[in-house]
Amino acid sequence: MRKSTAALADGREIIYFDHDGAPARTSHDRRELDPVSTTSQLRHDPVLGEWVMLGSHRQNRTYFPATDDCPLCPSRGGRQTEIPSPDYDVVVFENRFPSLSMHASPGVVPTLPPLVGSAPGVGRCEVVCFTSDHESAFGRLKPEHARLVVDAWADRTVELSALPGVAQVFPFENRGAAIGVTLEHPHGQIYAYPFVTPRTRQMLGNAVAHAERTGRNLFADVLAGERESGARVVASSSFWTAFVPAAARWPVEVHLYPHRQVPDIPSLTGDERDDFVQLYLNVLGRLDALYDQPLPYVAAWHQAPRGPGGEQAYLHLQVTSVQRAPDKLKYLAGSEAAMGAFVTDVLPEDVAERLRDVTR
């Protein structure tokens, strides 16, 4: 892998990740851009004990551009995009409309109730373009190219974790209009949060309690139970297992676990990364074949946060979809949206069986 770094016209960083032997990438951005907003705020909800990110400038972000005006395609034919080079393998750059910024300032904050804390939205948001091919998808990448994306995730996890104030690094992909994606080019994002997210706090709290009761790792025990049962296993390999969790919340939900406990993507060996790529591409192919159409999904990496409490963390990838039938979506209504208590319409065992039996 060859890594090269440059700056965009407004000062944002752009990083190219190329296969060895790829040509040098153009770094000069000739556009005239407005400064990136630094008005991101954090407000703390005292009732739930959670931080909320406020970024009103994001209302003006790019929304469903035409294919020939895609900002994530390479700069070609005189048209300048977010990527100055006329081609690339994998590229990462700072988001032009970030929810968090390392340059965030308090700005004008209205008078808040005494119990509601506030702070600048310090952190970093990056866009990860998986390929220069606008018509492709992660699931259609060649294994060696998908491995390059994994290596880019690992690199960014290390770099972002080292930034002052960053508590957790979260790589993810939102795919499909049903998820809310407004740019069709194959891409994901990375959030570097200044706090540990609610889901991570809850999972690690449960893992700590489990370790105190049993002396074992909660995630390792879950994985062992699923592998022993086999009823919900979708596919497995030398180093990874993909399964539908027994208490799945979403119509389609698949978790991918490595067979050994590691805290984050950088901790994976080369063999584990190669093996993940093969299994993940297999799973994505099954997901798209499930309804014979591209499946909308969120693919979310769960990594250990910085600081104490992360020793029980167990790296895994969670893929979820709201598609409950070829022509039906699951909407979060009263019980889910208000109470966080999910009602599922399909049995996890049935979903796993369908994914195992699907003709790709």
Image (spheres, grey):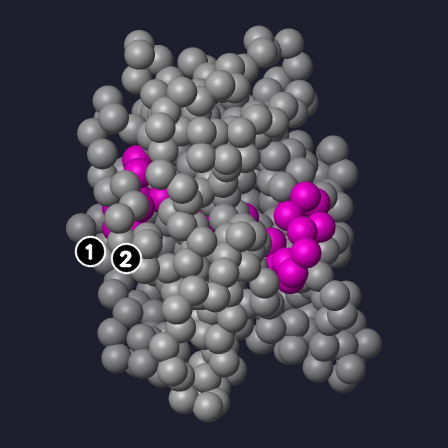
Q: Which residue is mark 2?
A: 324
Which residue occupies the foreground of this view, 234 or 21?
21
Q: Residue at x 47, y 89 (%)?
A: 115
Which residue occupies the foreground of this view, 159 or 347?
159
Few, some or many residues within 10 Å of mark 1 (<14, 14–19, 20+): few
Question: Which SS class for mark 2?
Answer: strand
Provide residue 61's location: percent of width, then percent of height. Answer: 29, 45
**Image-based side of 7 in relation to 63, left or right:** right
Provide residue 227's location: percent of width, then percent of height. Answer: 64, 57
Q: Quadrant of residue 314?
A: bottom right
- The numbered mark at residue 328 is 1
Residue 180 magenta: yes
- The numbered mark at residue 106 is none
Q: Amino acid at mark 2?
A: Arg
Q: Residue at x 49, y 40 (%)?
A: 94
Which residue occupies the foreground of this view, 8 or 162?
8
Which residue occupies the foreground of this view, 40 or 86?
40
Looking at the image, how many numbered discs can be counted on the residues?
2
Q: Residue furthest front?
A: 108
Q: Amino acid at mark 1?
A: Lys
Residue 221 vs 110, above or below: the answer is: above
Q: Quadrant of the C terminus?
A: top left
In three-dimensional space, the C-alpha distance between marks 2 and 1, rounded to whole angstroms, equals: 6 Å
Mark 2 and mark 1 in contact? Answer it, CB < 8 Å: yes
Question: Which SS class for mark 1?
Answer: strand
Q: Residue at x 29, y 28 (%)?
A: 70
Q: Which residues are magenta?
A: 157-184
Q: Quadrant of the N terminus?
A: top right
